[in-house]
Image (cartoon, helix red, strand yellow):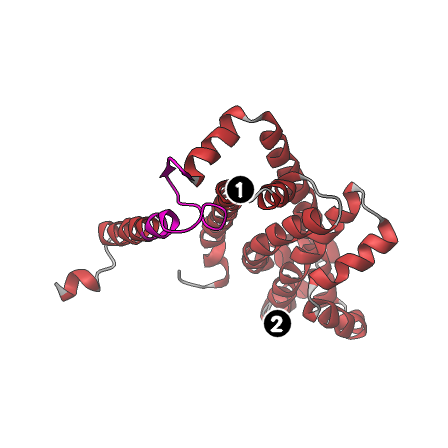
């Protein structure tokens, strides 16, 4: 019995995962049935207690307005997260290559990283207004710094012996980036991207809450005002599932390239 409990076999892990998931769902269902529907919603539900799962199915397959909201949030997330990745990765390598620039801006970057990004939303609203691009900026700010710091640390950890070999062959700066820094830094950058995925989703919802209400943030606000907890929980489940899938996808890519930096996973 002890061997099964401590086993790392695939079937044991899957059985444990499914048992934990089913137990949690059962507890939530029981609690949901014993609360006021305006306060708590069960997962399956029934008469007098609308469930989150049936509501989510209806949202996705029979509610065009909700699908438009979902696609709008995905577009916002993709735009902001894509900009964060496209800017943070090269900037991290650049800061590792240029010591004076890193020393000059490091304190500013640290200050922004330590600042709760939600606190900056009123400033963004006052300066840029309620349009689409201010919301993109919020998503960028939420996800930018984990990618930057991991990329920077990866680029700074490049072994001096590799640089000496490259210099002995008179490699250009472009060659150093293409053949050394980008391949060596890729696993570190992927770690930062995985960490930033959840933060970007938080930034997406925060932007939709506090700027112009739209997307899935709007759906949560409207449902909560109507005391429709089944709709609120259904939307949260969808956001959670999206975050888990994205993080698992990045994690799989990260594991694929982890061997480049000599890490066993």
Residue 149 drawn at (x, y percent): 64, 65
Above or below residue 162? Residue 259 is above
Please identify the quarter of the rendering in which residue 119 is found. Answer: bottom right
Residue 39 drawn at (x, y percent): 49, 51
| Magenta segment boundaries in residue numbering | 27-49
Q: Residue at x 49, y 45 (%)?
A: 233
Query: Which circle's residue, 1 or 2, is located before the other in the chain?
Result: 2
Q: Are marks 1 and 2 in contact (CB under 8 Å)?
A: no
* Dot 2 crowding, Cα within 10 Å, few <14, some 14–19, many 20+: few
Question: Which mark is nearer the camera, 1 or 2?
Answer: 1
Query: Which residue is the site of mark 1?
Result: 228
Given residues 66 and 168, the one toward you in this image is 66
Q: Say what secondary structure mark 1 lies in.
A: loop
Q: Is residue 263 magenta?
A: no
Q: Say what secondary structure mark 2 lies in.
A: helix
Q: How many marks?
A: 2
* Dot 1 crowding, Cα within 10 Å, few <14, some 14–19, many 20+: some
Above or below residue 47? Residue 212 is below
Q: CA distance from mark 1 to mark 2?
A: 60 Å
Left or right of residue 194: residue 25 = left
Given residues 28 and 197, the one toward you in this image is 28
Query: Which residue is the site of mark 2?
Result: 160
Q: Is residue 48 magenta?
A: yes
């Amino acid at each position: 019995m002890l061997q099964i409990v401590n086993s790392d076999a695939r079937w044991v892990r899957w059985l444990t995962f499914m048992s934990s998931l089913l137990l949690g769902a059962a507890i939530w269902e029981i609690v949901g049935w014993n609360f006021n529907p305006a306060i708590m919603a069960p997962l399956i539900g029934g008469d007098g207690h609308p469930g989150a799962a049936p509501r989510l199915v209806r949202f996705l397959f029979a509610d065009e307005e909700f699908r438009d909201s979902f696609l709008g949030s995905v577009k916002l997330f993709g735009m902001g997260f894509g900009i964060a990745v496209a800017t943070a990765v090269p900037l991290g390598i650049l800061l590792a290559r240029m010591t004076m620039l890193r020393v000059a801006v490091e304190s500013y970057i640290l200050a922004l990283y330590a600042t709760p990004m939600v606190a900056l939303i009123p400033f963004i609203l006052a300066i840029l207004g309620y349009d689409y691009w201010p919301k993109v900026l919020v998503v960028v700010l939420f996800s930018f710094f984990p990618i930057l710091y991991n990329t920077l640390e990866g680029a700074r950890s490049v072994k001096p012996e590799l640089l000496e070999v490259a210099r002995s062959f008179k490699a250009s700066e472009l060659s150093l980036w293409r053949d050394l820094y980008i391949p060596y830094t890729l696993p570190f950058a992927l770690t930062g991207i995985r960490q930033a995925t959840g933060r970007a989703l938080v930034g997406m919802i925060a932007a939709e809450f506090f700027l112009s209400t739209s997307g899935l943030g709007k759906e949560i606000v409207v449902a909560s005002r109507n005391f429709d907890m089944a709709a609120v929980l259904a939307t949260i489940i969808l956001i959670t599932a999206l975050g888990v899938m994205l993080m698992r996808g990045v994690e799989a890519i990260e594991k694929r390239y982890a061997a480049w930096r000599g890490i066993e996973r």
